[in-house]
Amino acid sequence: MEKELSIVIVNWNTRDLLRDCLESLFRTTKGVSFYVYLVDNGSVDDSVSMVERQFPEVILIKNRANLGFTRANNQALHNVHTPYVFLLNTDTVLHNGTVGGMVDFLRENPDVGVVAPQFLNRDGSKQNTFDNFPSLPTELLNKGLLRVFFPGRYPGKRVDYERPLEVESVLFAGAMLRQDAFRQIGFMDEEYFAYLEDTDTCFRLKKAGWRCFYLPHLKMYHYGGGSKGKSSSERANSVIEYYRSLYRFFRKNRSFAEYLILKLFKPLRLLISLLASLLGLVLTLFMHQGLRSRVYGYLKLLEWHLRGCPSSMGIRGEKGEKAVEHVSR
């Protein structure tokens, strides 16, 4: 019998989170036949052998290096031919019925290309599962205030939605896509190494006429930052990578004038934030660890801008076809 769903997970040194994720996946997903593809980006923490021992049904794609979230997902997606595809982060734990509920919604709404459930923090509080497409207002103004004053245009987690809500984009930490829609627009843009590949994909889906929905009645935990380092340097590299993706989104999907305005005013806003954080650090006699880390991050980000946004800075790993090992079952 042909299976209905393929679940794609990308891993990089998150063995324990990955184990919890897979356990919750097999425990909570009932009434849906599915494959699980795991793309490992050169982990050195025994992730692969753990999966081979404990989850032999998982289809493994092993890379020798970190190819990034986007390219790794595309590796698996080239092998997928089921009607629906569920992209899932390792730092997630699913609730009962979440996967089946998303499949049901896509079955019942053939014009919908992608859906996502409500993401929750460890304490059960809500995360932002969906977002607006990046624009000059969202990037140069306070997004929180935009959500307060213009909730219809900029919806957010502060509103308790009871019914499915059509949104511009959802996060791919746990999003289900219709295979036909995905094939129509092509695979994810691999120029996005780690961030905003989901936003770009949703943007292209919307341009192609597909709808995107947030499903508040379905839940999953998303712990966040599973494969990000905790040092100030690693956090700064992650922010640099986010900015690189943001600039690519504008260059690709917005006007050239909007792109130039963003490239001009983003560093100015960063400089103001740096000065404010430095003042706070002085007032706390340099004892506030969070402010110290923030100042370091702003300095590295400004350095990246001053150096012309070089590709050598950020979290990009080694690329190339030689980094791909093989697919195993």
Image (spheres, rainbow, N blue to C red):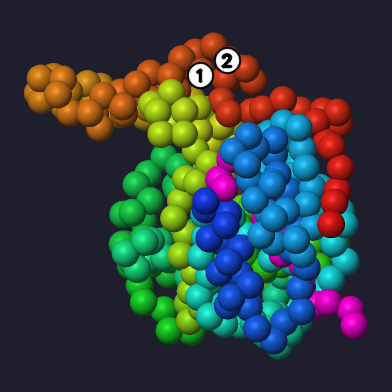
Residue in front for this viewpoint, 119 or 94:
94
Q: Is residue 272 magenta?
A: no
Circles 1 and 2: CB distance less than 8 Å? yes
From the top left corner, tell me how far across and down residue 251 is, in percent: 66, 36
Along the viewing direction, whichever of 2 and 215 lies nearer the viewer: 2
* Image location (x, y in percent) of residue 37: 76, 58
* Image height of 207 relative to 294, above or below: below
Residue 152 falls in image quadrant: bottom left
Name the residue carrying label 2.
308
Which residue, given by chain and number where applicable, does mark 1 sit on?
A: 305
Q: For label 1, count other residues whose C-alpha is less than 10 Å away and answer few (under 14), some (14-19) or many (20+).
A: some
Residue most extreme to the top? 307
Quadrant of the frame with the C terminus: bottom right
Query: Which residue is located at x 69 percent, y 39 percent?
Result: 41
The part of the image, by quadrant, that contains residue 124 is bottom left
Q: Examine the rendering and report whether any part of residue 130 can be seen.
A: no
- Does residue 147 appear to the left or right of 96 in the view shown? left
For the N terminus, give its image quadrant.
Answer: bottom right
Q: Which residue lies furthest to the front in this view?
A: 53
Amino acid at pointer 2? Gly
Q: What stretch is highlighted in magenta?
A: 1-15
Mark 2, Cα crowd under 10 Å, few <14 / some 14-19 / many 20+, is: few
Secondary structure beneath dot 2 equals: loop
